[in-house]
Amino acid sequence: MKKSTIAVIAIIAALAAAVAVLFLLNWGSIQGRQQLLEDGELHLTHHTTSETFVITVADIEALNPQPLQAILRGGGQPGVDVEFYAVPFAALMQAFIPIQDDVDYTVVFTAADGFATAMPQSEAMHTAYIALCAERGPFRLILPYDQFAQRWVHWLTGIELRL
């Protein structure tokens, strides 16, 4: 066998081993996120008080979600008008965590696959909505004024308030 063939096989084996190790290291996190999706739960964490609130689909429904029109763009295709049933992020905050006007937290919205988007609390309170979805997870972050939906979070499993 040629040396170049042996080198390629060794590199592929090393990459496969690295993927296996990373998978094993993240297995607990993967299982936890999968369980959140199956249970239909969203965790709202306030880092300064270390409190975590478990929000269910029923909790969102109790906040009376309203129709929300948003333009969904993606893949270089023209935008499509989509209707979601959503509650303003501000209503969710008022229901679970008292708002401090003198502190502007960073709000981090995290998906089951680890994708996250962050924004100042002042922006989230005025532009973010939490939608109930039948596809792509029970919860989704919608930012109707985000021109290309780049910061929308599908399969939303966590919201963190950080200083």
Image (cartoon, grey):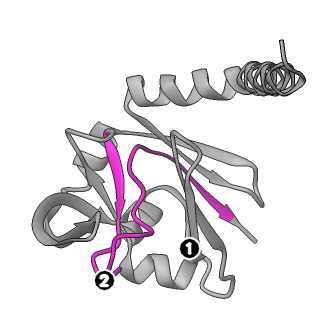
Lateral position of residue 62 relative to residue 79, left or right: right
Under circle 2, the secondary element is loop
Q: Nearer the viewer, mark 1 or mark 2?
A: 2
Q: Which mark is residue 155?
A: none
Q: Nearer the viewer, residue 131 or 58?
A: 131
Vertical arrangement, residue 122 with respect to residue 112, above or below: below
**Residue at x 65%, y 73% (from the top left corner):** 106
Are the residues flagged by discs 1 and 2 in contact, CB closer than 8 Å? no
**Residues drawn in magenta:** 138-161
**Label 1 to label 2: alpha-carbon separation:** 23 Å
| Residue type, numbered disc 1 | Ile
Residue at horizontal 78 percent and vertical 61 percent from the top: 48
Q: Residue 22 colored magenta?
A: no
Ranked by sequence position, the earlier of labels 1 and 2 is 1
Residue identifier under label 2: 145
Image coords of residue 15 (percent x, y) = 77, 28
Residue nearest the observer in this picture, 45 or 84: 84
Q: Is residue 42 left or right of residue 136?
A: right
Q: Relative to residue 127, is residue 160 drawn left or right? A: right
Write down the residue under mark 1: 99
| 14 on left or right of 129 | right
Residue furthest to the bottom:
102
Asked if 77 appears above or below 120 in the picture, the reply is: above
Count residues near mark 1 (Cα–Cα under 10 Å), then give few for <14, some for 14-19, many for 20+: few
